[in-house]
Amino acid sequence: MTVSFMKKAFVLVLLASAAWAETAATIPLPKPHTTGGMPLMQALNARKSGREFSPEKLSPQALSNLLWAAYGVNRPDGRRTAPSASNRQTIDVYVALAEGVYLYNAKEHRLDLVVPGDLRAAAGLQPFVAQAPLNLVYVADYAKMAELPDATRVLYSAAETGSIGQNVYLYCASEGFSTVIRAMVNRDALAKALHLRPEQKITLSQTVGYPSRTPAEKKGAN
């Protein structure tokens, strides 16, 4: 093996590594399926919380559909599937996967890497959060409500978070996924891990995945 060949091979490895890093930093999502699914009244009837999850990953298409249903863009003017006061769009959706934590970019419908590595366990205090394939972390950006009193900012961000969370519940009911929205989060530790600004506040977290289909899951539904 010549030195020249080894140098070329080394360069190719570096290029491949750079390409992989670039791909990992941004995950383009498939176009969401915005038709079909379970009729609304049936989805409402099937809506429930589940706390037992299979570790099986969601497919790229299912992840795309989930995030679009949660807080995707559904109109040409950039408005979303969930309402927000004065269309401020104060909530950011962080997605904790085994590969890292990503920020959902609704405008481009993609995931942008925030922190590499598996931080799923940091998204909650219950053991199941580390086993489930993903956790959604809802973060309110108070900078978008800077002129408002604190109580109003809390109210607006809570209402917006609740709407997003219910969208996730209905999508999961329609597709047979399990989910539970949670307030039990170590907010200070998670905010530090996500490098949040002081004006960014974690509201709630929501775990999503395939149900484990055990008796414990049925008992945990509410």
Image: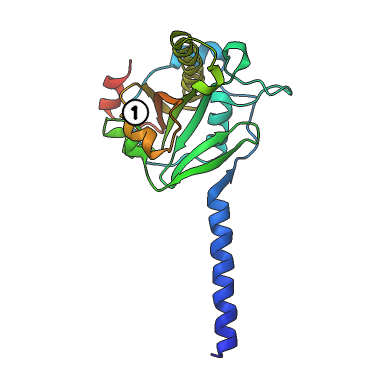
Observer-nearest residue: 142 or 171? Answer: 142
* Quadrant in which the C terminus appears: top left
Percent x, y of residue 107: 65, 32
Percent x, y of residue 12: 59, 72
User: 92 left or right of 178?
Assistant: right
**Residue carrying label 1:** 187
Q: Is residue 133 visible?
A: no
Does 92 appear above or below 148? below
Q: What amino acid is at disc 1?
A: Arg
Observer-nearest residue: 158 or 178? Answer: 158
| Residue 120 found in image quarter | top left
Which residue corresponds to the image point at 38% horizontal and 45% vertical from the top-left?
Answer: 118
Which residue corresponds to the image point at 57% horizontal and 31% vertical from the top-left?
Answer: 65
Badge 1 marks a residue whose secondary structure is helix
Pointer 1: residues within 10 angstroms few (<14), some, or many (20+)? some
Q: Of all residues shown, which one is farthest toward the front?
A: 147
| Residue 147 found in image quarter | top right
Number of on-image labels: 1
Percent x, y of residue 39: 57, 16
Does 97 appear above or below 222? below
User: 189 left or right of 201?
Assistant: left
Q: Is residue 81 visible?
A: yes
Q: Of all residues shown, which one is farthest toward the right?
A: 76
Does 144 appear above or below 130? above
